[in-house]
Image: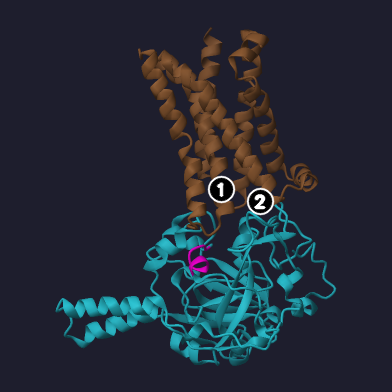
Amino acid sequence: MLTTKQVSWLKGGVFIAALVPLLRMVYLTVTDQLVDPLEFITRGTGDWTLYFLCFTLTITPLRRLSGWNWLIKLRRMLGLYTFFYGLLHFITFLWFDHFFDVAEMWKDVLKRPFITVGFIAFVLLIPLAVTSTNGMIKRLGGKRWQWLHRLIYVIAPLAVLHFWWMKAGKHNFTEPIIFGTILGVLLLMRLWWAARK
Amino acid sequence: MLIKRSPNGIDLPFSSEITPRALYESRRTFIKQIAMGAVGSAALLEMAQREAFAQGMKLPAKLNPAFSAMDKQTPFKDASSYNNFYEFGTDKSEPAMYAGTLKTRPWTVSIEGEVKKPMTLDLDALLKLAPLEERVYRLRCVEGWSMVIPWIGYSFSEIIKKVEPTGNAKYVEFVTLADKKQMPGVGSRVLQWPYTEGLRIDEANHPLALLTFGMYGEVLPNQNGAPVRMVLPWKYGFKSAKSIVKIRFVKDQPRTSWNLSAPGEYGFYSNVNPDVDHPRWSQASERRIGEDGFLSRKRKTLMFNGYNDVAPLYAGMDLKKYY
């Protein structure tokens, strides 16, 4: 078992490490090392949303298998980073693709299924981010809060579908298959445990 | 209108007048080898020269202003490091990293099918077939970005004249190299190999269709489709076959690689058309690499990429159907 002090060090470390991908994108852009920084940032923020989604959903099964209860202290931060990179990803879409023309953006969201599912996944993340504070957990009550946060089991498949369709035109399914498998295993473990209860 | 002369009448310098970096570099390597005492044989000298030809060798050509856009040219660094060339990997940075293994000499192109004079030409014969011209073309990728590149070559119509197609020749098929040993991406199942492209014969005969050997005053870098490729500025980039080994004149419309892979997304014609969206994104606008970015909207994509001279080729055709 880690001490409280060790846990806060760990949280600080994870907080900073989670910013590294963003700082790298900014650094490569301002130092002019990218031929197409807009594409790099759009893809990078999308990729990291999926990574953090996987990290967040790994916490509970890993805690259960390992008995490392301190892991739970990292879960909220990882979940909020999922939202943070998802928000950046959404902003790149609104900014780079539509230059903040919301009406044009809506047309795109409604017309293209891969954007529609990505957009829904992002919108569903918002209530989870908003209710992530201790105060909100108290106000909602633990049970209701937990039910609300099960939305993540809807969001994860939508996110993979969004990525899958994005890659479909070039038949590049390697990465979507990897994400799909990881998230599938993480969700099946939960189903298995729920069924044995 | 594509043909824009310099508005103030000032002639632009040919990029072919600039000594390429790679030539300096190869000279330095060579001097180093002399210093190390490794030189002494004529064979090594010849090797060094051949090496210089393979990459970064000057390719003299006169600018053809009638076929040159006045848009700001994309930096060589960007045009040679951001490539879709799946034979070397699906990531756009991979061709520049892995195309060094491509051997561009000796190289032959066989021209066959419905022609009176089939022939197999080596690179030197091809280079001498017609005078080389430099032409600055806009390049629009189907992915939604664009560049402006000074290419070197001559109109493909020169080849057509030479081989004399028969009355049966309705289409031209371009077959490209697919050698696993030189091209690590050929093992992947992303596309059907060899990468094959095609044109209707009147499209191939249009003077804008350029059989291309160089860019920015040098022979083509491997990652840009060395040693010989097509450039079709009014079509999306993937229509321009790279590293061509065979040109076939045929009766029926050839099956093309991207069309086989995703027929709903990539048509046989694939003319640049702002009114026909790709199923997953709009084609109405584009991002000019190195120019459009954080502070400005994307620019409007022009019909036929601004090359309206080709419009008569498609008179009466429904371009929404024949995308």
Dot 1 falls on a residue whose secondary structure is helix
Checking the image for residue A52, the label placed there is none
Residue furthest left in the image: B37
Dot 2 falls on a residue whose secondary structure is helix
Quarter of the rendering containing residue A158: top right
Please say if the residues under marks 2 and 1 sit with CB atoms less than 8 Å apart: yes
Quarter of the rendering containing residue B238: bottom right
Name the quadrant of the N terminus of chain A.
Answer: top left
Write down which chain is painted brown: A
Which residue is painted at 25% across and 85% down in the image? Answer: B45
Quick check: B120 above or below B281?
below
Magenta region includes residue A112? no
Q: Residues within 10 Å of mark 1 (few under 14, many from 20)?
A: many
Span highlighted in magenta in the image? B77-83
Q: Residues within 10 Å of mark 2 (few under 14, many from 20)?
A: many
* Number of numbered discs on residues: 2
Mark 2 / mark 1, whichever is N-terminal: 1
Identify which amino acid the numbered label 2 is placed on. Answer: Phe
Is residue A153 visible in the rendered image? The answer is yes
Q: Position of residue A40 (x, y in %)?
A: 54, 51
Label 1 belongs to which residue? Answer: A41
Q: Position of residue A72 (x, y in %)?
A: 47, 17
Checking the image for residue A96, the label placed there is 2
Q: Give chain B's shade.
A: cyan
